[in-house]
Amino acid sequence: MSEEKRVLLEMRDICKSFIGVNALKGVDLVVREGEVHALEGENGAGKSVLIKILTGIYQKDAGTIRFDGKEVNFTSPAQAQEAGIRPIYQELTICPMLSVAENMFMGNEIKKRGLIDWRATYKRAEEILQSVNLNIDVRQPMGQLSAAMQQMVAIAMAVSLDAKLIIMDEATSSLDDKEVQSLLNIVKELQKKNIAIIFITHRMNEIYEVCERCTVLKDGEFIGCYDLDKLPKLELISKMVGRDASTIVNFKKQYNSDIESNEVICEFKNVAQGLRLKNIEFELKKGEVLGFAGLLGSGRTETGEVLFGIRKYTGSITVKGKEVHYANAGQAMKDNIVLCPEERKRDAIFPDMSIEDNITIPIMNKISRLGFIDRKKQAELVDKYIQMLKIKTPNKEQLIKFLSGGNQQKCIIARAMCCDPEIIILDEPTRGIDVGAKYEIEMLIQDIAKSGISVIMISSILEELERDCDRVVIMREGIVVGELLHEDITEENIIHTISEAHTN
Amino acid sequence: MENDVNASLLQIQELSNKALKRSEFAKKYGALIVFAILIIFNLIVTPGFVDSSTVWNLIIHTTTTLVVAMGMTFVIATAGIDISVGSTMALTAVVTATLLPMLGMAVSIMIGLALGAGIGLLIGTLTVKFKIQPMVLTLALMIALRSIARMVSNAKTVNIADEGFIGLSVNYIGGTVPVQLIYVVVIAIVFYIIATRTVFGKSVEAIGNNPSAARLSGIKADKNTIMVYVLLGILSALAGCLAIARTMNCNPSSVGSGMEMDAIAAVVIGGTSMMGGKPRILGTVIGCFIITLITTTVNMNGIPSEWSMVFKAAIIILAVYIQSEKKIKVRQSKIKPIASKEV
């Protein structure tokens, strides 16, 4: 069937180099009308460069681009948009304080006698959103919408501007399952309207849910273009990472039932906080990986924050046998509890500081004498963790902002490790990280637990919980609704527990 | 930025490193370049510039600004600001000058410094705990403290007779080298070490770079931020002492007037971002010398002194332009097409 569709975009033999280094070496990308086309590859494979050439941000060195029957060569993003190519980026450029309608028509205002015609603006904005089944108040500030809603507004806007090809670059990476679903539904709607979509994501399941074909890149080279119904997931990942992926995907934790009889290191009883947490109760044992599962808003992240002392609560928390009441992160860290936050960029990274400083910042007091940092000790520690966690960096003076997402995350885990923790809270440890690095981080979590540290792993990716956890606590709307152990931890069981709690 | 790096990890990393080095170079040496240009200009144009007395005068006139600017560097590194420094100087100086005949040098200086610390503590606490914008808060204090300073001496100039106290600023080693040379060298070294090698310096940098991450890393952001204002208060008081010791009298209306602008300009020229981040001490030191050198240039060439302000403004804009990110991007895009043609 797909053979009948007209070819909309044809990029052939695209080459691009930066100061003599080849970023793309003869890459093809062919997208048909009304097709959802996945573009996959690890970080550094050249996906973003290819997209930037297509959207006119970079200029190609060689190759041809045909779009909508004509040969094109966009020299600015405006030209590409004019032609009907609309990229929707992971981090949307919005003005959070302005209304939804204002954001939608920014730079393109509907005017009457030189002034903005607000009535027409609101009416048109509502029409556009309704065309993709969105019913929201267009007068509310954009910042009040969830990340998913913002994405959908951006998509609706693209559709209204006669987009022929929409590029979704990591559009789903910061959304939870439910939001991803509604976004994918919109993608399917667009497909019916014969709009082509290039879909870039690190989440394999999404590819198989909405995409028809997939182009795979590796190290700037074109690996191939495949029909997804003929290419099993395992093979796709193998092609992306360039080696047999079965070790990654088929990895399953070796359970050690002795852990169940280990001492309880931390216990929550009746913990509540405002509307977010109503009744959280669980036990954490020494050396176990405890997963927190649940939808967004279920209280997973909040529970982690309560334990780390950065969120007020009522109820009782016991750590190492004594009741505690942490008022800030520093107090929790004194009891050897550390947190690797969900929003790495916002809450963890000091972008303009070196890797060395980024890793050792919480323990600077410990490695200093009279306030002076012991540089030798600092260097030794950092070297040790760069080796242990295989952080890829030319040197430890490198600013952390120049590392890839996976390596940044490793630095943040190294930061947690050098505090000599007994409890590590990892909030979405694999978010925004490519397949290969994801595997390394998951292995790292196992190693950490083996060394006797208790890990709390908060994740919206159920497969991950299934692979990595000894035990999973399932939450719904601030209440613990279930617990699964060892082999019982499966995606189906987790979903089942959540939905069962819903019907009760 | 992050996406670019992901695009082609190692290759682009190299590219970013180059961009980084260029941007770091501009931030580190931007002030030095402007300083060099000024010196060369003076060597050619200004009559009698090549003289050891020019150097000594430059150092003498820079010292007070330098003392204040050291503290200001840390305040700006936390993304804060304090424009009341000149008035703090006036108040602490007039108190020290008034107490000098009664309590002697050591005690009255200590009281002055303690008062400066108290003012810093007040600003820090109101900023951190009561969330008052430091810009507005210190603007109000700038007006209030200057008035209080006048009240202390009934708006009269207090004369200073204490030989030891005057010796703080009027003292020549071997008859020619001013004591200020020692102050400048010691202060620059001490604060450079504080900024780069101490927990306090790194904490300040972290707070300015990402306050949220600093809080989650267990850094006591409130305490460190208050400390930064206290430090600036003490340094302002010290600068006040050095200023009145040199003039041998204390006029509460003129001591430290315009100091806030000189200090902030020196910090900005030195490459510390107003958005917070790395405190660039050596940059600030050069920034201070640039500010003084402009005045010297204007005076020695017999240009009406009104013009010195205009030149100051022009130099500040030039120095900040050299360091601006925009400049770097322009260079990058110039490089790319050339490279792509080669392939």
Image: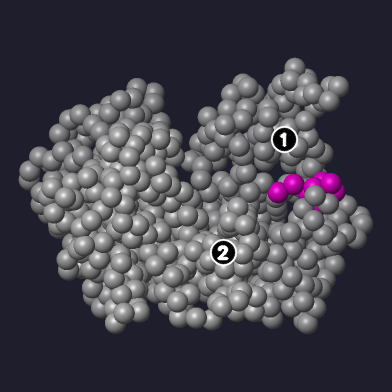
Instruction: Give me the residue at 74% from left, 47% from top.
Output: A86
| Residue placed under numbered mark 1 in the picture | A106
Q: Name the spot of residue B190 as percent of width and height, x first.
A: 29, 69
Drawn side of residue A157 relative to residue A461, left or right: right
Q: Name the spot of residue A130 as percent of width and height, x first.
A: 70, 25
Tag 1: Cα neighbours inside 10 Å, few (<14), some, or many (≥20)?
Answer: few
Instruction: Decide which of A206, B129 is in the foreground and name it.
Output: B129
Residue B211 shows which numbered tag? none
Which of the 4 image quarters holds residue A494?
top left
Circle 2 or circle 1, nearest the eye = 2
The image shows residue A301, relative to residue A121, as above or below, that is below
- Tell me which segment is drawn in magenta: A80-87
Farthest-out residue, left: A321
Amino acid at the residue labelled 1: Met
Q: How many marks?
A: 2
Tag 2: Cα neighbours inside 10 Å, few (<14), some, or many (≥20)?
Answer: some
Instruction: Give me the residue at 64% from left, 79% from top.
Output: B44
Instruction: Decide which of A291, B4 is in the foreground and name it.
Output: B4
Q: Secondary structure at mark 1?
A: loop
Q: Name the spot of residue A396 as percent of width and height, x first.
A: 39, 74
| Residue placed under numbered mark 2 in the picture | B299
- Chain of the residue where label 1 is placed in the rendered structure: A
